[in-house]
Image (tube, rainbow, N blue to C red):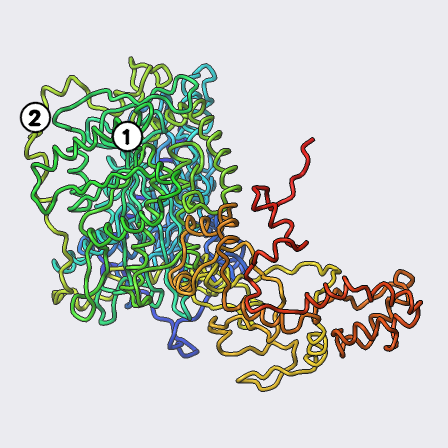
Amino acid sequence: MAELLEAELASVSTIGAAAVLDAAPRQAGPPRPVEPKDTAEPIFPLLHNNAGADPDSLAPGATVASRTGPGAGFADDNDEDEPAIARPFHRTSSPDSAVRAGFPLVTIEDDEPPIAGDPGNGAMSRLVHKMHKFSLYETASRFYIVGGDMTEKRYRILKIDRTADDATDLSITDDKTVYTQKDMNQLLDTIDDGNKGTGGLKLRCTTWGLLGFIKFTGPWYMLLITKKSTVAMIGGHYVYQIDGTDLIPLTPPGLKTDQRNTEESRFLGILNNLDLTRSFYYSYSYDITRTLQYNITRERNSLINGQPCNVDDDFNPMFVWNNHLLQPAAKVLNAPYDWSRPIIHGYIDQAAVSIYGRTAHITVIARRSRFFAGARFLKRGANDLGYVANDVETEQIVSEALTTSFHAPGPKFFASPAYTSYVQHRGSIPLYWTQDNTGVTPKPPIELNLVDPFYTAAALHFDNLFERYGAPIYVLNLVKARERTPRESKLLEEYTRAIEYLNQFLPAKHKIIHRAWDMSRAAKSRDQDVIGTLESIAEDVVTTTGFFHNGDGHTTPIRVQNGVARTNCIDCLDRTNAAQFVIGKRALGHQLHALGILEDTVINYDTDAVNLFTHMYHDHGDTIAVQYGGSQLVNTMETYRKINQWTSHSRDMIESFKRYYNNSFLDGQRQEAYNLFLGNYIFALGQPMLWDLATDYYLHHEDPRTWLEKRKRDYIHWFTPEFLEERILVPYPPIAGNVVNQSVSAYDDYWLEYYRPSTLSSFLKMFPFKMNSTIKYIPFKSTQDGRYDLSPFRVRTEGGEPEVPDKKKHKKEVTILAPHDIARNSSDDAAPIVNEKSGPTAVHGRGISLQRWLGQDKPVTNGVQGIMKETAMTPNITDAEAQAIKTKGLSALEKSRAAQWTFTKVVHESLNPTVSTAEAEDYARYISHPQNLPLVVSSEIPAGEIEPEYQEYIAGSWQSDGLDAYGYSAAANGKIPGIYNNHNNQQHHNHLGHEDDMALYVEMLQIGDNPLTVTEEDALKKRYKAYRKWLRGKSLFKQQPVD
């Protein structure tokens, strides 16, 4: 025990001495002697593959080989640029005791900011020394977290005491001193020597950050991020997804857990039901809890005041999901966000759209509120604080990747015109309503638990929306309007009355816009176009709220979004996601138009850009649906666009079963995990356990006993007038004098995170190079022969660029050819194709015309066409209608109608025949050459299967001379050599010379003035037998016998 106390006193005194020594004025210590240099100093710093390879980072006696060993550098050229697991702090060999006795003063280069925690630096010091990776060391009585910045030149240390089970408060010490690598090595060696008697200092793990601390019935636990992956890059700031976490108890190493404490084990099991590796995100230098418009406005307002903005003090607590875990550290640390990072729960994805060399990045960020969060049937409507269930804020950022940062040349800080943003909102209907899922029905009845004549919950909710987004609020209500058994329609009526009540007190220009539309009924109806209606609503929404477009206000205009579109259905999942996609698609067109990429604000479906955007919103909807409903989307955009009906229908049924199973059996476990992680339930002595609660109603609502003490809200002036004021972004101001002299690093550290100095990087390892892009979906082979337009806004289906068919096996089949086609094809084999650029090329070459490359080529028709129509089942349309179809395009519903072919149309066209121009020319050619009929020919004639007489007949002279009336009688009389000369000519003459047959043949050759008209004389002819039967009421088609 004495050795342990002595070791801890030694370590504490060492840290204190180092902190005091480092905090002392730099002029107090003796200057370091300047050594003569044999070689000239290079003008530019040397490029190292490991960031911390400077001479000061080497301990005395250490060689270069020891520094370049395993874990020496942050990234190796053969490894990923951002590894998933952090590498530990590189500890060199322990120096001797003489060197360890005192810490040499840290020298500061002239071009670097001061290292010590100078009070005058403020936010700038924390911005430069922001820590990105950490190493956790442990002794018998403490944990030490060593944090380093991106350059691995500056380090800090955090001390956490190991406590007993009955400890109520944490003991955390933050050393404000910034150390170099050599000083940190000496400090860790000193701590190691002071704890030799109890095992020394050991590396426990590496981490990317601290999520916070939590306590149940026993000891404190520390939650760490152990793995991460990059998912987005915004303005040079990376956004990461958590891929691995570790829960470490802050107990002494020899303390054994009490196996009889089943409550502690059960709490840990409940916490493990929340998977932190699914859809949790964080960033070191960008505030992902706020929208881009809010972040830019905050920075610009700080510039007006002449000082940098401190981002760590203004996180949105509504979206910080580890807010409860950060409270213990926030109580004892002045800067808790130096060591811990706030995380959001939702969805983040980023993709690139390539437009002829210009690249636009589309980023979708969904933030789920931690207030009134829970599972589908367990959290419905709103609580008495105005927070609604399934509250998700969706932001889409569209930026041009010409420059990386938020800054414009000048420099004009946070004034780059290459960034746009649009924000939407979804949330449950803000009324007091529930659904009891204790039964087995997949759709439990909806109950309005409380009818508030003043609609207090809805008033609080809309006032919060005014605070976050401004006015007006565009409510898109997609619940069902007509039902046999009223379920959703009850909420529609009550919600409509609530908005009408609240609107009567709002100013005219700030009233809530309510648009109710039964989307489910429209999707099932054949005479309604769901997508077309949503498109018109989306255009109205985007033009009403506007969108954010950054700029300086002088050379580039500024646009600000005022208001938000609030979309809801009953679950805020399937219908809501489809409506949000259409609104986002319309906003995407406006954003690309504002960036100068599109000439118009409309983007067609089935283009590469919209297909990529559809996949992003489909994944966005699936993720939100899994978090709230337990399964992916049941009805996707394919369902509402009525494409791929068979495959989507089976998928929708499977997801419905999965959602029903999760809602019935697993939602309770997820709700308990949410309540425990978010701090809705905190263990206290004498209180019931979490699993013993009959309901969690009082965990999410106010205590009714405090209602009388709380001042009631005004029923008439339910809104805050300041929240209705228009959001503005002032033009770029003349900056104060002290700001002009500052460099970009004083306001933004994107060049440290994205453009890492003194580090070898390659394009293949950079995230913007590896992100999903429209260019990856272009078939490479098609671009070589010019059959593919590289524009991402070109329609790839009917009426646009044709898809490249897959290669199929060649099958042996017969070909219908006319005799003159055989002669022409034989001569065409050697004919060259002349390319406008490359001259004559072979037939099998890749030469194409300019019209084919532009996609404007038309199918070439031969001079002689076949006698059979290609589209016999296509309804007749006029030339004007055909031109309208090509220019305008048809919806899925109109295409299905145009493809329908009924018996009524058969009868109608039989009684009212019409002939198109192409059919008239085809018929004219047919009647002018009645004998020139195509034959079924094949290049290969199997031996022994065809009689010699037939071969002689095929090789006869009739192919060139024809069989006219003279040739017919001549052949019958045996005057023409051929097949008739090889048989009994007299017998053929007696048979073919029959007067009836001859008269029939002559009659066939005679062509009337109007060959398409059937007269009364034709009624007795044999070939009109079926027509006579049809006139008597019989069917045109043969009736098959029924077994």
Q: Is residue 800 above or below residue 651?
A: below
Residue 32: horizontal and vertical position, in percent? Answer: 32, 65
Residue 438: horizontal and vertical position, in percent? Answer: 39, 17
Q: Which residue bears the numbered disc 1?
A: 372
Upstream in sequence: badge 2 or badge 1: 1
Residue 813: horizontal and vertical position, in percent? Answer: 74, 60
The numbered disc on residue 711 is: 2
Q: Residue at x 17, y 68 (%)?
A: 740
**Quarter occupied by residue 784:** bottom right
Q: Is residue 1042 visible?
A: yes
Q: Residue furthest bottom?
A: 839
Q: Residue at x 14, y 20 (%)?
A: 706
Residue 622: horizontal and vertical position, in percent? Answer: 42, 41
Element under disc 1:
loop
Q: Residue at x 28, y 48 (%)?
A: 19
* Amino acid type shown at disc 1: Phe
